[in-house]
Image (tube, grey):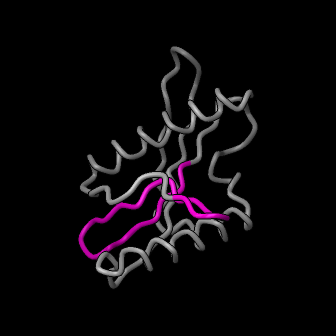
Amino acid sequence: MPARARAARGAWAEHLAEAVLVACGYATLDRRYRIPGGEIDLVVRRGADLVFVEVKARAADGAGEPECFLAEGQRRRVRRAALAWLAAHPQSGGPRLRFDVVAIVHHGPDGGVDICHLPGAF
């Protein structure tokens, strides 16, 4: 997939994931937080839970579930970015930190989407 199309799909998936999380009572604190060597798609809070969210999207082409494509190196980059985010927002830390995945599978133009929120995925 060309880089531009991949970026557009990523932005669409992140927007959809955020809408689902907000509908479930989460408040968005940040989007696409980036540092050299790391990125967090969404930072959300619900109650005492501060959650760093990685959004994974795939077409329904049999290539596997989106959450399976989160390699250890990518998990390290998300954790590194989370530490930087916490350092930049010390008042936002809470007693419970969590790393979630929101997996989105797109079934083509007329097939709809499947969305799976995996709390504490890593």
Residue 21 at what x, y percent from top left?
34, 50
Q: In terms of depth relative to the viewer, which is nearer, 94 or 66? A: 94
Q: Position of residue 55 (x, y in %)?
A: 53, 49
Q: Quadrant of residue 97?
A: bottom left
Compared to residue 92, the image places residue 110 above or below, namely above
Q: Position of residue 105 (x, y in %)?
A: 57, 36
Q: Residue at x 38, y 57 (%)?
A: 30
Q: Quadrant of residue 47?
A: bottom left
Question: In the displayed structure, would residue 88 be above or below residue 62?
Answer: below
Give the mark count.
0
Q: Main secondary structure of the magenta part?
A: strand
Which residue is most to the bottom? 95
* Left-right relation of 92 to 113: left
For the C terminus, which image quadrant?
A: bottom right
Residue closest to the eye, 1 or 62:
1
Q: Say if 39 sits above or below 88 in the image.
A: above
Quadrant position of residue 64: top right
39 shown above or below 22? below
Residue stretch rendered in magenta on the structure:
34-55
Q: Is residue 29 left or right of residue 78?
A: left
Which percent across, then down, holds residue 89?
A: 36, 74
**Magenta stretch: includes residue 54:** yes
For the N terminus, which image quadrant? top right
Residue 115 is one of the magenta-drawn residues: no
In this rendering, position of residue 50 left or right of residue 38: left
Q: Nearer the viewer, residue 103 or 39?
A: 39
Look at 29% across and 80% down and name the residue there.
Answer: 91
Residue at 47% from the left image edge and 43% from the top image edge: 14
